[in-house]
Amino acid sequence: MKNFDKFSTNEEFSSVYKVGKKWHCEGAIIFYLNSYEKKIAVVASKKVGKAVVRNRSKRILRALFAKFERYLQDGKYIFVAKNEITELSFSRLEKNLKWGLKKLECFK
């Protein structure tokens, strides 16, 4: 994720949530807004579990994003962890996220 910056303001989150495309996949929700900037945010609410579980979920999503990063278009990405992310294997989650990113037309 060395090429992507983090979101800095609440307005950036709001704009991606309101204007961007959204795709629900097993384990996560992907929000994407085409932009000249390269930014990413990974979010896990308290519904996912205790702090240890939430942090692990975010680490997994960041690792998968880093795996796909060089194939993705510039833009703003938000990954929201769902409750069932704790029950999925890494390979299954990878497959689901790849499918979701393809549906959002994020690949170059």
Image: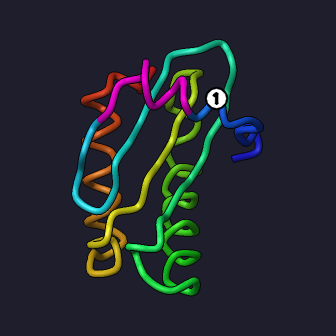
Q: Quadrant of the C terminus?
A: top left
Residue 90 locus on image (x, y percent): 36, 71
Relative horizontal placement of residue 86, taking residue 37 as reference (left or right) = left
Residue 43 visible in the displayed image: yes
Q: Main secondary structure of the magenta part?
A: helix
Residue 88 locus on image (x, y percent): 27, 75
Span colored in magenta: 14-22
Q: Secondary structure at mark 1?
A: helix
Instruction: Count all numbered tags in the image, as a single digit.
Output: 1
Residue 53's place in the image compared with 96, above or below, is below
Relative horizontal placement of residue 16, taking residue 66 as reference (left or right) = left
Residue 65 locus on image (x, y percent): 52, 49
Residue labelled with disc 1: 12
Q: Which residue occupies 53% across, 35% down? A: 77
Residue 51 locus on image (x, y percent): 57, 83
Amino acid marked by disc 1: Glu
Tell me the quarter of the picture where residue 85 sits. Answer: bottom left
Q: Which residue occupies 64% across, 29% down? A: 12
Residue 106's place in the image compared with 60, above or below, is above
Q: Does the stretch in magenta take in 17? A: yes
Q: Does the stretch in magenta take in 39? A: no
- The front one of 27 and 19 is 19
Relative horizontal placement of residue 45, taking residue 8 as reference (left or right) = left
Residue 3 visible in the displayed image: no
